[in-house]
Image (cartoon, grey):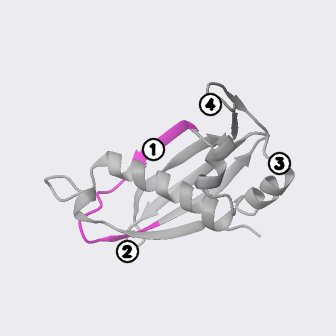
Amino acid sequence: MNNYFTKTEKIRFKHVDYAGIVFYPRFLEMLNDLVEDWFEEALDRPFSKIHETNGIPTVDLKVQFKKAARLGEVLTKKLWVIKLGGASVNCGFRFEDEQGNTCLEGEVTLVNVAISNGRDAIKAEPFNEEMKKKLSLFII
């Protein structure tokens, strides 16, 4: 089953600059929120649990800003898996306005890491088979 993970988000005053359009760092925060929601809601791995012993940092990010998003608009945010590696997952993402026009699109690569007890060392760690199976449901 190939799925997008999809969420909607209303553009609020906190997202926009003086011109009333989304200030680009807010788009990246929205992307991070989408990833965090995906792990919690679809993969059953909330960050609150992951971060007890592991992490899932972004190691590569490519973004194209296609169209301004304005205060009051509702965006549909989509995320999917392009490639699943041993410890990494490369995802595509797209944010669309209410007419289906792309405002933002790109790719993000996340790596599963183990964090030492003293939190002083981080090392890539392969996804377990259960997580690979869950992630593979989103390959498009």
Residue 66 in magenta stretch: yes
Neighbourhood count class around disc 2 (C-alpha, 10 Å): few under 14, some 14–19, many 20 upward = few
Q: Which residues are magenta?
A: 58-76
Neighbourhood count class around disc 4 (C-alpha, 10 Å): few under 14, some 14–19, many 20 upward = few
Which residue is at 59% across, 54% downward? 48
Q: Residue furthest bottom?
A: 98
Residue 1 in magenta stretch: no
**Residue underneath mark 1:** 63
Q: Secondary structure at mark 2?
A: loop
The three-letter code of the residue at mark 4 reads Arg
**Residue underneath mark 3:** 128
Q: Is label 4 in contact with label 3 (beta carbons under 8 Å)?
A: no
In space, the residues marked 4 and 1 are separated at their CA atoms by 31 Å
In space, the residues marked 1 and 3 are separated at their CA atoms by 29 Å
Neighbourhood count class around disc 3 (C-alpha, 10 Å): few under 14, some 14–19, many 20 upward = few
Q: Is residue 20 left or right of residue 11?
A: left
Disc 4 vs disc 2: which is toward the camera? 4
In space, the residues marked 4 and 2 are separated at their CA atoms by 43 Å
Disc 4 vs disc 3: which is toward the camera? 4
**Residue underneath mark 2:** 98
Neighbourhood count class around disc 1 (C-alpha, 10 Å): few under 14, some 14–19, many 20 upward = some
Q: Nearer the viewer, residue 53 or 5?
A: 53
